[in-house]
Amino acid sequence: MSDSNTTDFTNPSTFILLGIPGLEAAHVWISIPFCTIYAIAVMGNFTILFIVKMEPSLHESMYYFLCMLALTDLLLSTSTIPRTLSIFWFNSREISFSACLTQMYFIQCFSVMASGILVAMAFDRYVAICDPLRHSTILTNPVVAKIGLALLMRSSMLVLPTPILARQWPYCRTNIIPHTYCEGIAVLKLACADIRISSYYALSLAFLVTALDVFSITVSYIQILRAIFSLPTKDARLKAFRTCGSHLFVFLTFYIPSLFSNLTHRFGQNVPLHLHVLTANMYLLLPPMLNPIIYGVWTKQIRNRLFQFFTHKGT
């Protein structure tokens, strides 16, 4: 391989991740909030998994879907943040070509998986509020397991063409990626070929899958809100709204950063590069940190079980 900054190589054995271009001198300081957010995300999501496992009363569809989301959040953040921190702390910038494509695949796969789980959670709340008498018979444990498997198959198969197509292109411009991780668009921009197939597929995957999921969630919550406002008493309406409030908030914290990140990458030519990179990192960092906090605060059963665990431990 020739000089890593220039020409005459195809499919390089390694890529070089720059981190956050323009802010290299501040990498150590930037690593502090990154590491803190990641630690909170890991502890929070493991806490959700532990509480649901240990508390038999939480062994129902809503909490099983929550566990799926917690596990997906753990995998999504872990697929990027350790590599990012190694760049910040140890200047470890090299990543092999295959590892780069693998990271790109898992980031997109877990993102699509998380989106699908939010749809499943919205459907669960729709059944629980609009048809409560049949909730336990519709969303049985085998049905929940099949939904989880279907979501896993959907995400893994839809994203699979992305690294396969990316591997076909020659990379003869440079092997330097101005990013903290192998983000799909950042990698494809290095190819010296007509990559419209990859670009169009990535764009359709980002917007069509997201649009379908957002539409499904929106329809579910319109029906849920109609059912809530038709309840006879104020207490019943308030209880139902609290049950769905956490789901709505998680929905917003996932899709708004995702949409902003995709729009700035595609159409924000005048946005500084370091802001692109920071936005892409926040999209992967914030939802895994916020989700367990939101459910811990808003969901009474989880909050009470966590409180009992610490008070019992303290006595």
Image (spheres, rainbow, N blue to C red):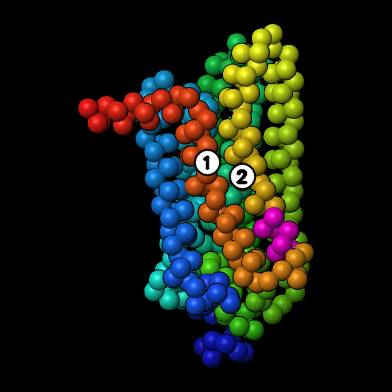
Kind of element beneath mark 1: helix
| Residue situated in front as seen by the camera: 83 or 268 | 268
Q: Residue at x 52, y 44 (%)?
A: 290
The image quadrant of residue 78 is bottom left
Q: Position of residue 7 (x, y in %)?
A: 62, 89
Label 1 with label 2: CB-CB less than 8 Å: yes
Q: Position of residue 283 (x, y in %)?
A: 59, 54
Looking at the rendering, the stretch of residues picked out in magenta corresponds to 260-266
Q: Is residue 153 visible?
A: no
Q: Residue at x 65, y 42 (%)?
A: 252
Give the numbered dot on residue 245: none
Q: Is residue 199 left or right of residue 10?
A: right
Majority secondary structure of magenta residues = helix
Spot the residue most to the top.
Answer: 232
| Residue situated in front as seen by the camera: 307 or 230 | 307
Q: Residue at x 31, y 31 (%)?
A: 310
The image quadrant of residue 307 is top left
> Eyeballing the image, is 143 above or below 182?
above
According to the image, label 2 marks what residue?
253
Spot the residue most to the left.
Answer: 315
Q: Position of residue 69 (x, y in %)?
A: 52, 40
> Eyeballing the image, is 48 above or below 12?
above
Residue 242 magenta-highlighted: no
Give the numbered dot on residue 291: 1
Count of marks placed on residues: 2
> Eyeballing the image, is 48 above or below 257?
above
Q: Residue at x 70, y 64 (%)?
A: 265
Q: CA distance from mark 1 to mark 2?
A: 8 Å
What's under tag 1, amino acid-wise? Answer: Asn
| Residue situated in front as seen by the camera: 194 or 252 | 252
What's under tag 2, amino acid-wise? Answer: Thr
